[in-house]
Amino acid sequence: MSLGRLNHVGVATPSITASIAMYRDILGADAIGAPFDLPAQGVKVCFIDAPNTQIELIEPYDDSSPIAGFLARNPAGGQHHLCFEVADIHAAIADLTAKGARVLGMPRIGAHGTPIVFVHPRDMGGVLIELMETPAGH
Ligand code: CO
């Protein structure tokens, strides 16, 4: 695989509404998407555009969501993952697996409508890495 652009930084939050207000009113974000549900992952998501990447705000609405566990350990929320683009998710999974990195589960459709997978933080220097197939037209 070849490392692509940083698509977004995932940030877990107990309140997307409060986080949107913080990014807008304190940090001056002016390109804030509408929050939407991602039922496969039990979360509500909202993307905030920065000039060179996005912030993905993630709020669980379901206690079975992995994000709920993260918030139990980090009640104020916090940085959750980094998402890099790859040209071909299946080729990336095969390459990572061959190199001994643990890919978590099968590819699923992520918040941008393209296949994603997560890679175990213990194999990624303590950082949860999301790989996302580059959206068409990018
Ligand atoms: Co993400």
Image (cartoon, rainbow, N blue to C red):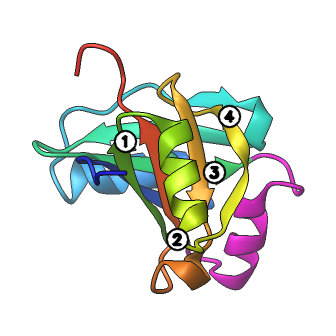
Q: Residue furthest top?
A: 137
**Which numbered disc covers residue 86?**
1
Kindly report the distance in space between the C-alpha atoms of the residues bearing marks 4 and 2.
22 Å
Magenta-drawn segment = 61-76
Contact? badges 4 and 1 (CB < 8 Å): no
Q: What secondary structure is marked by label 4?
A: strand
Q: Amino acid at mark 1?
A: Val
Along the polypeptide, which appears first: circle 1 or circle 3?
Answer: 3
Residue 103 versus residue 39 in the image, above or below: below
Q: Mark 4 packing: few (<14 Cα in 10 Å), some, or many (20+)?
A: some
Along the polypeptide, which appears first: circle 4 or circle 3?
Answer: 3
Query: Mark 4 highlights which residue?
Result: 108
Q: Is residue 64 visible to us here?
A: yes
Q: What secondary structure is marked by label 1?
A: strand
Query: Mark 2 highlights which residue?
Result: 99
Kindly report the distance in space between the C-alpha atoms of the residues bearing marks 4 and 1.
14 Å
Whether residue 47 sits left or right of residue 101 in the image: it is left
Q: Is residue 18 visible to us here?
A: no
x, y (%) of residue 48? 32, 40
x, y (%) of residue 1? 37, 51
Q: Residue furthest front?
A: 98
Task: Based on the picture, tell me whether residue 33 belongs to the magenta stretch.
Answer: no
